[in-house]
Image (cartoon, rainbow, N blue to C red):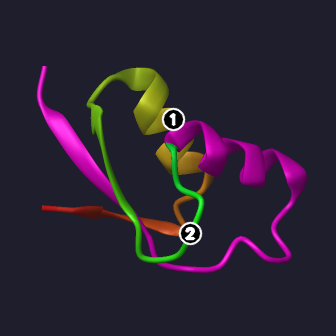
């Protein structure tokens, strides 16, 4: 499978607890951090849940 790079572009302050936990599960704890994950349905679902806080980096 291919990998995707995910970058947190907005602050988690004010986000609901479930979205904060999703960011933690993705490994994003600070702004402008980039993490790399395998592109699978579970990761894509987590990215979709917090799509307003993150972006996919090429």
Give 39 or 24, whichever is nearer the viewer: 24
Choose the circle earlier in sequence order: 2 or 1. Answer: 2
Q: Percent x, y for residue 34?
A: 33, 61
Please identify the quadrant where the N terminus is shown.
top left
The reply to whether dot 2 and dot 1 touch (C-beta < 8 Å) is no
Residue 56, by quadrant, is: bottom left
- Up the image or down, 48 lies above or below 7; here it is above
Residue drawn at (64%, 45%) of the image:
24
Q: Is residue 8 left or right of residue 23?
A: left
Tell me the mark number nearer the camera, choosing from 2 and 1: 2
Q: CA distance from mark 2 to mark 1?
A: 20 Å
Residue 29: assigned label: none
- Up the image or down, 34 lies above or below 32; here it is above
Q: Which residue is mark 2?
A: 30
Residue drawn at (56%, 69%) of the image:
30
Residue 46 counted in the magenta span:
no
Residue 19 counted in the magenta span:
yes
Magenta range is: 1-26
Mark 2 secondary-structure assignment: loop
Residue drawn at (48%, 24%) of the image:
42
Q: Which residue is mark 1?
A: 45
Q: Percent x, y for residue 21?
A: 74, 44
Mark 1 secondary-structure assignment: helix
């Amino acid at each position: 499978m291919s990998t995707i790079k995910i970058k947190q572009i907005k602050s988690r302050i004010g986000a609901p607890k479930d979205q904060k936990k999703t960011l933690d599960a993705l490994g994003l704890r600070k702004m402008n951090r980039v993490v790399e994950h395998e592109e699978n349905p579970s990761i894509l679902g987590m990215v979709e849940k917090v799509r307003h806080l993150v972006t996919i980096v090429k």
